Amino acid sequence: MAGLITMDDLSNDEILRILDDAERLLPVAQGKVYLPLLQGRILGNLFFEPSTRTRMSFETAMKRLGGDVVNLGDVKTSSVVKGETLYDTIQMVDGYTDIIAMRHPRQGAAQYAQDAATVPILNGGDGAGHHPTQTMLDLFTIRQAHGKLDGLKVVLAGDLRYGRTVHSLSHALTRFGCELIFASPRLLKMPAEIVEDLNSHGSSVVETEDLLSSIHDADVIYMTRIQKERFADEDEYTKVAGAYKLHAKNLEGAKESMIIMHPLPRVDEIHPSVDTTRHARYFEQAFNGVVARMALLCNLLDIEVPASIGPEGGDA
Ligand code: NCD
């Protein structure tokens, strides 16, 4: 069965349908309704890199829907340290589970895993490659705030070179006709092949080093962490560390409806003074990971989400 490796695996119609499913699943994610759509199903969580939100929200999503989860756990206590190949690990977990969520430091690892598996693989981040399940919760958050995806002006800021969240998100936003502004230090510019791909989809991308002058007419500002772990050279990291620090006072001229997002964890790129402004949306965004992943799990397991979900559980 096909999984979700990059945003190319979903059409725009499929994306919108999954976002609609996610919206209906909100009371289930909040624990107000118990709807065991995934009873008897097992998710395998294989995280070969650190994760808090992605791993835990997959687990919460599965459990809120009555399903179960098995975890690889700490890589250091798994057979990986004995030299087991990713291919063998996947072949085995394939037999234990109905669907697998995987994060791996190597770009392309999710596709490689899908080639070794019969169950769907959900790519929870492959090195500096892609992070499509994050994109689904990002799109959910943007649509929740603005009521639409098309035609918005979105600033993606920070580490656009190594940040997999912005690689997947920029692709999806372009497909929905958003105007994109890429704000990054020169060293961390969006890879040229991604910019070319976006241009070939009819996008008009603006690249700048100046984040502050992009704030006043933005609908969304998407901040990212500088991905320290991807730098081959510590000195290179030191040159760009702390490049952007958004503070509440920088937001004075912003549109009232503008939202600030961040996939988290943040380091120092969003000052805590921003948290209490009307613009901050990053903690709601993290919560939305549960509904978006619930909807994805149902979709990839071919389980239909009821057209209306009543307060007593089941269909209204
Ligand atoms: C992101 C990731 O792992 O790519 N985190 C996440 O999934 N929410 C962003 C990051 O680590 O900076």
Image: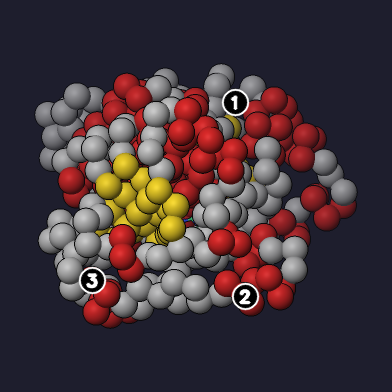
Q: Where's residue 5, x and y in %?
A: 56, 33
* Secondary element type, mark 3: helix
Callout 1, which amino acid? Val
Side of 181 relative to 224 (left or right): left
Side of 237 relative to 225 (left or right): right
Q: Which color mode does the image show?
A: secondary structure
Q: Residue at x 22, y 62 (%)?
A: 216
Callout 3, which amino acid? Leu
Tag 3 or tag 1, which sits nearer the N-term? 1
Tell me the tag on residue 119: 1
* Secondary element type, mark 1: loop
Q: Where's residue 110, x and y in %?
A: 64, 37
Q: What residue is disc 2 on? A: 239
Residue 283 lies, with reference to residue 109, above or below; the image says below
Tell me the tag on residue 212: none
The reply to whether discs 2 and 3 touch (Cβ–Cβ < 8 Å) is no
